[in-house]
Image (tube, helix red, strand yellow):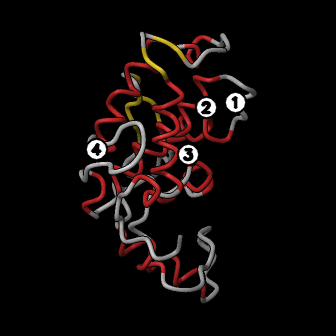
Amino acid sequence: MTDDTNDGFRPTRRSVLRLGAMSAIGIGIGIPAVSGSVAATIDCPKTPGYWANHPETWPGDELTIAGKTKSNEYWRGILLDPPKGDKAKIMLKHYIAAVLNLRTLQSGCTSATIKYGYYEGYSIEDVKNMAGPWLKHTSTWQNGRKQTSWYANDMDGEKLKDTLDAFNNNPASLGLDCGCDDR
């Protein structure tokens, strides 16, 4: 959601933690109170569902995804929209989450080499960079046609999607140590 009255303030991790603490003591700011140590889990990759439900944690006001620069609210709408079997929309959800994770994580796991799976030897950034052209080639998410195959541009999009999904949900399954103690 774009706030035209925004004074240019972009919350940092520390300010989000403070805002969460303020919410916990009853100051109504729209961020739910959290229990436990947020600092212990703030550096873990988050799922598409997390990003859809926590727009206050998104960096900046817009993102460029597969060559398209749109508002965060536009991309959030895609995360909230059921894909109904559309392979491009399924990929796009994991791609958006991976982009947000790569932009907000501070651990070294984003550049570490994947140890398990189809893309062993690559980094998650490499996999994201391969998924971008797959999305650009399908472009069904932009024109309303349903993408029914995982194959596009001579690439198996399902393997790319599965790797992004594993990173977003459980980076340890790829052999990546993101310091996540909550999984």
- Nearer to the camera, 22 or 87: 87
The disc labelled 1 sits on which kind of residue? Pro
The disc labelled 4 sits on which kind of residue? Ser
Give me the disc on residue 123.
4
Q: Residue at x 38, y 67 (%)?
A: 43
- Nearer to the camera, 82 or 171: 171
Dot 3, how many residues are within 10 Å of its Cα: few (below 14), some (14-19), or many (20+)?
Answer: few
Dot 2, how many residues are within 10 Å of its Cα: few (below 14), some (14-19), or many (20+)?
Answer: many
Between the residue at mark 2 and the residue at mark 3, the CA separation in whole angstroms equals 22 Å
Between the residue at mark 4 and the residue at mark 2, the CA separation in whole angstroms equals 21 Å
Q: Which of disc 1 and disc 2 is earlier in sequence?
A: 1
Asked if the residue at tag 3 contacts the one at tag 2, i.e. Cβ–Cβ closer than 8 Å, the answer is: no
Give me the disc on residue 90.
2
Dot 4, how many residues are within 10 Å of its Cα: few (below 14), some (14-19), or many (20+)?
Answer: some
Dot 1, how many residues are within 10 Å of its Cα: few (below 14), some (14-19), or many (20+)?
Answer: some
**Which is in the foreground here, disc 3 or disc 1?**
1
Q: Which of disc 2 and disc 4 is earlier in sequence?
A: 2
Up/down of 28 relative to 120, above or below:
below
Between the residue at mark 2 and the residue at mark 1, the CA separation in whole angstroms equals 6 Å
Between the residue at mark 1 and the residue at mark 4, the CA separation in whole angstroms equals 27 Å
Q: Which of disc 1 and disc 3 is earlier in sequence?
A: 3
Secondary structure under tag 4 reads loop
Q: Which residue is disc 1 drawn over?
A: 83
The disc labelled 2 sits on which kind of residue? Ile
Q: Which of disc 3 and disc 2 is earlier in sequence?
A: 3
